[in-house]
């Protein structure tokens, strides 16, 4: 079976390559913003839109002649920038996202280029890229397959990464055949139907004091000064450290779950809606349930398993997992343990919910 998979490498470009990447970031951002403004103006004035082919043709025949510095960038990257804009419009029309926004200079920068005539390849501890030459990387992952494209990314702290999209043959990995229901929470990140609880690492909370101090230091620096830029990078590195720790924890946790289970059932939470609660928004964001379940879903597929999402309207916390009766009093989140008024069974709130989520998920799978 053939699939597309991403392989990400830490990159260490030299001075010339960093300058080239900066030019590419700027040119791609300019092309994206230029045609976003033009498509927006075309709609407002004529109630018409521009297709990808029209913008691509105009870029090659007109804009590059008017802005000659665009010729210094990777031409494939400029075309991909237009493709990304067109995809953003398609997602907006299909109501999968908001209206496209202009790209900013101060955020994470990236550009994507395609592998034409083997222009992208790994050579030992280097990756060959169009116009950039051989870029030094930390080659920690090997693969056998055809590289279709590459994305170069510069983070807010100045770190560089190169992500390769690869078409490869793959075999489904084995799993131990277990079945598990998972209830997500904030005190305990996950509680499963086997009564196991995974504590919430609360990564942001543990680093919040240092982040606050670095943010105050940044706000005191004069705008445009070198000291402000140094303070900005220190703050960005701390935020990236938090993200790296969270990412590492999620990868290890989801790998174990996918390796042990054939079926995992979770609740299809409306995280975006829950984030509107200003008292819990920061804790929910720190828990990062959406990203956790995204990783779990593709790893379950890698191991031949299946992830079932139980509808959020299912009252998993209110139902007795022994007799099935519903206790509406359990809607109060402060109740962490309760006794069923019908059968007398004593329940831990989260374990009971996980058992009910597993039962509902297996019912959905059978139907």
Image (cartoon, rainbow, N blue to C red):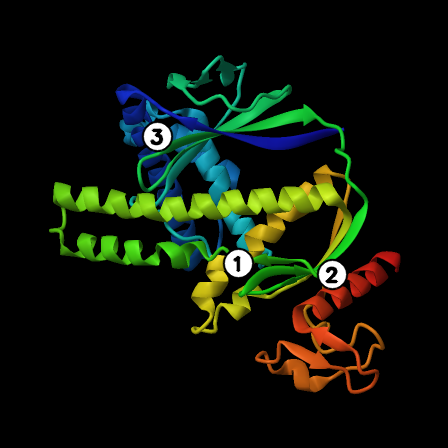
Q: Is 61 in front, or is 269?
A: 269
Q: CA distance from mark 3 to mark 1?
A: 40 Å
N-terminal label among 2 and 3: 3
The residue depicted at 51 percent of the width and 24 percent of the height is: 140
**Residue 23 left/right relative to 281:** left
Q: Earlier in the sequence, mark 3 or mark 1?
A: 3
Identify the residue at the far top of this view: 123
Residue 208 x, y percent position in the rendering: 34, 58
Q: Give the SS element for disc 1.
A: loop
Residue at figure coordinates x 40%, y 33% from the top left = 59
Secondary structure under the numbered disc 3 in the rendered image = helix
Q: Give above or below for 124 relative to 191.
A: above
Nearest the camera: 100 or 57?
A: 100
Q: Disc 1 designates what residue?
A: 200
Which sits earlier in the primary sequence, circle 1 or circle 2?
Answer: 2
- Residue at the disc numbered 3: 24
For disc 2, the neighbor class at 10 Å (few under 14, some 14 to 19, many from 20) is: many
The residue depicted at 33 percent of the width and 34 percent of the height is 27
In the image, is 183 to the left or to the right of 90? right
Residue of label 2: 193
Q: Do we see residue 86 in this rendering?
A: no
Q: Give me the C-alpha separation between circle 2 and circle 3.
A: 50 Å
Residue 147, given in percent of the width and then of the height, sits at: 58, 22
Of the 4 image quadrants, the one containing the N terminus is top right
In the image, residue 135 sits, relative to residue 180, either above or below, namely: above
At which x and y percent is residue 160? 37, 31
């Amino acid at each position: 079976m053939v699939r597309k998979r991403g392989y990400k490498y830490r990159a260490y470009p030299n001075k010339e390559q960093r300058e080239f990447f900066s030019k590419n970031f700027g040119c791609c951002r300019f092309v994206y913003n230029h045609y976003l403004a033009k498509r927006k103006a075309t709609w407002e004035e004529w109630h018409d839109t521009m297709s990808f082919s029209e913008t691509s043709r105009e870029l090659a025949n007109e804009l590059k002649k008017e802005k000659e510095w665009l010729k210094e960038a990777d031409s494939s990257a400029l075309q991909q920038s237009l493709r990304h804009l067109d995809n953003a419009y398609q997602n907006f029309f299909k109501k999968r996202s908001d209206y496209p926004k202009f790209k900013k200079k101060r955020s994470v920068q990236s550009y994507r280029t395609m592998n034409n005539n083997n222009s992208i390849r790994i050579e030992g501890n280097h990756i060959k890229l169009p116009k950039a030459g051989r870029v030094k990387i930390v080659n920690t992952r090997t693969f056998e397959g055809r590289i279709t494209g590459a994305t170069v990314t510069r983070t807010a702290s100045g770190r560089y990464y190169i992500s390769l999209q690869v078409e490869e043959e793959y075999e489904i990995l084995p799993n131990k055949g277990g079945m598990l229901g998972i209830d997500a929470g904030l005190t305990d990140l996950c509680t499963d139907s086997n009564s196991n609880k995974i504590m919430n690492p609360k990564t942001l909370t543990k680093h919040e004091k240092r982040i606050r101090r670095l943010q105050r230091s940044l706000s005191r620096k004069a705008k445009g000064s070198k000291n402000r830029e140094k303070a900005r990078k220190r703050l960005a590195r701390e935020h990236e450290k938090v993200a790296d720790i969270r990412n590492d924890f999620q990868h290890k946790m989801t790998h174990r779950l996918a390796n042990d289970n054939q079926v995992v059932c979770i609740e299809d939470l409306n995280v975006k809606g829950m984030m509107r609660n200003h008292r819990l928004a920061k804790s929910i964001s720190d828990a990062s349930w959406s990203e956790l379940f995204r990783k779990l879903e593709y790893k379950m597929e890698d191991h031949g398993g299946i992830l079932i999402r139980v509808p959020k309207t299912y009252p998993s916390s209110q139902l007795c997992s022994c007799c099935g009766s519903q206790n509406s009093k359990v809607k109060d989140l402060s109740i962490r343990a309760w006794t069923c008024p019908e059968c007398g069974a004593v329940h831990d709130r989260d374990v009971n919910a996980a058992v009910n989520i597993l039962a509902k998920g297996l019912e959905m799978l059978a139907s």
